[in-house]
Image: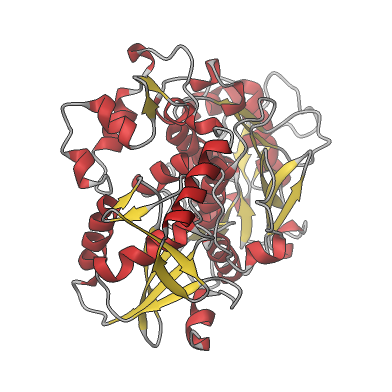
């Protein structure tokens, strides 16, 4: 039985298969990784001595195991530090059984890891043959060499986590992609298409990601609305940028101090983790599905097509139950590119980050028709209408305040901001700053006057003096 302090450290419960080993090396870990992949997944935990070289040792062992465990599959390594230091290997249930370590196949038998007998191996092979081919493994249609994103392909093959035997085939890119399960029969798979082609939406409309920002969902006009398409990781980064741009930042000026303190309203690491999970676990086979990001004044909601894995509900998800990967090939590439560091425990990290930020607990929901959603809630104090010098302002308003000097017309402001859409500037910059009493109209009785200009209020001057990049 694993000691209580370890299960608490990992935020696990005793219902999960947790293997404790005494030696941190490939031969000690490999058989257990094979066994967990061939059964229901779990964790391997090893107490280690924390030294300056431990991270390099972890990376070396992981690289060796990625080459020794076949077929190629995702499992993650992490060093957890507390009163003691542990190496934690998180292993999901595999979808391409049987998995071997150094050509031997292992399974879990109660609390033990044993070599699989011929009947167990036969059952795994027969089960694999009878299961329908999953969407990400099917050959993609009409993908030519010109459709490939060379930059994404280079980034992938240059990743340090690429197994050594794949790196050795640098002159045969197609073979490299086949070993990564991104190609077969000289064609990209759907996973390869989603990850590496310039515009997979042409063939897979469900790959489109929509993002919208508004004050109230019932508003006629959105603050911002975008559709994102392209290679998966480029889209993911674009969505992160969209969220950062449309999410308020907390700007405070402590009493008796000229220093400006700025921080995000939400923990961006948790937001990124939630997005990565949506891209990795969504149901790509649903052609009417996709990913939707909604930003309002008091929450961020990330929704994706699909549902919780069988046997998983919100309670189990919050406890960090091992992931049952819907798209293991896509998840494997996210891990190789260092976007996905944790499998089942990402939910625990999200909760911890929100707690550190003083935010309400995030909420996961799953609906057969509506899909899976993760909602981050702003602190209640942010949603009040009481404005002080320690207030929440958007990035757009902060930028507007920084360029204000004297009296400026809307055309002057448009030019200084280097923007072209006058309606967007009026709605997201000027109107918002007026509502916060940071700028005022020079002709307040005639808002639409052709001679209308804008200037900073006393409060605006007080905040502007500490904004980086503000005019003198």
Q: Position of residue 16 (x, y in %)?
A: 56, 71
Q: Is residue 50 above or below residue 172?
A: below
Q: Position of residue 212 (x, y in %)?
A: 66, 34
Instruction: Residue 246: name its quadrant.
Output: top right
- Number of marks in the image? 0
Q: Is residue 102 above or below residue 114?
A: above
Q: Nearer the viewer, residue 195 or 321?
A: 321
Instruction: Residue 267: name its quadrant.
Output: bottom right
Instruction: Residue 304: name its quadrant.
Output: top right
- Report the residue that reaches farthest toward the front: 119
Residue located at (60% from left, 65% from top): 351
Visible in this render: residue 405?
A: no
Q: Position of residue 166 (x, y in %)?
A: 23, 39
Q: Position of residue 140 (x, y in %)?
A: 48, 20
Name the quadrant of the C terminus.
top left
Q: Nearer the viewer, residue 98 or 272?
A: 98
Q: Nearer the viewer, residue 253 or 225?
A: 225
Residue located at (44% from left, 28% from top): 231
Q: Is residue 50 above or below residue 417?
A: below
Q: Nearer the viewer, residue 103 or 457?
A: 103
Visible in this render: residue 321?
A: yes
């Amino acid at each position: 039985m694993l000691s209580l302090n370890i299960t608490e450290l990992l935020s696990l419960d005793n219902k999960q298969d947790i293997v404790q080993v005494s030696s941190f090396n490939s031969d000690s870990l490999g058989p257990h990784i094979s066994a967990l992949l061939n059964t229901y997944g779990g964790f391997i935990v090893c107490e280690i001595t924390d030294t300056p070289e431990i991270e390099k040792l972890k990376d070396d062992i992981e690289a060796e195991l990625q080459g020794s465990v076949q077929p190629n599959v995702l499992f993650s390594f992490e060093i957890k530090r507390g009163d003691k230091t542990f190496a934690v290997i998180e292993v999901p249930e595999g979808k391409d059984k049987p998995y071997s370590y150094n050509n031997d196949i292992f399974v879990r038998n109660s609390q033990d890891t044993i070599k699989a007998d011929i009947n167990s191996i036969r059952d795994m092979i027969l089960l694999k043959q009878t299961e329908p081919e999953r969407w990400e493994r099917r050959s993609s249609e009409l993908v030519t060499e010109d459709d490939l994103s060379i930059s994404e392909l280079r980034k992938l093959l240059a990743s340090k986590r690429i197994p050594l035997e794949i790196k050795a085939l640098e002159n045969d890119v197609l073979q490299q992609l086949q070993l990564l399960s991104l190609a077969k029969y000289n064609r990209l798979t759907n996973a390869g298409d989603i990850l590496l082609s310039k515009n997979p939406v042409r063939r897979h409309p469900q790959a489109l990601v929509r993002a919208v920002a508004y004050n109230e969902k019932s508003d006629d006009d959105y603050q911002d609305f975008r559709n994102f398409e392209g290679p998966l990781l480029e889209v993911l980064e674009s969505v992160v940028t969209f969220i950062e741009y449309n999410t308020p930042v907390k700007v405070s000026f402590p009493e008796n101090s000229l220093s400006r303190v700025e921080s995000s309203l939400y923990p961006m690491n948790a937001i990124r983790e939630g997005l990565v999970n949506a891209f990795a676990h969504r149901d790509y086979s649903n052609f009417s599905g996709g990913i939707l990001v909604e930003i309002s004044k008091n929450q961020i909601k990330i929704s994706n097509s699909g549902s919780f894995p069988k046997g998983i509900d919100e309670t189990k998800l919050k406890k960090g139950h091992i992931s049952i990967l819907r798209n293991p090939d896509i998840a494997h590439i996210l891990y190789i590119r260092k976007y996905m560091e944790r499998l089942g425990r990402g939910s625990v990290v999200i909760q911890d980050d929100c707690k550190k930020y003083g935010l309400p607990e995030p909420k996961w929901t799953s609906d057969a028709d509506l899909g899976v959603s993760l909602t981050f809630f702003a602190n209640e104090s942010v949603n009040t209408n009481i404005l002080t010098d320690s207030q929440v302002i958007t990035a757009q308003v902060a930028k507007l305040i920084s360029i204000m000097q004297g009296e400026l017309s809307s055309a002057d402001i448009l030019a200084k901001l280097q923007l072209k859409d006058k309606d967007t500037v009026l709605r997201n910059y000027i109107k918002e700053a007026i509502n916060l009493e940071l700028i005022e109209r020079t002709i307040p009785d005639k808002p639409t006057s052709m001679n209308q200009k804008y200037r900073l209020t006393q409060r605006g001057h007080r905040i502007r003096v500490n904004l980086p990049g503000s005019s003198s």
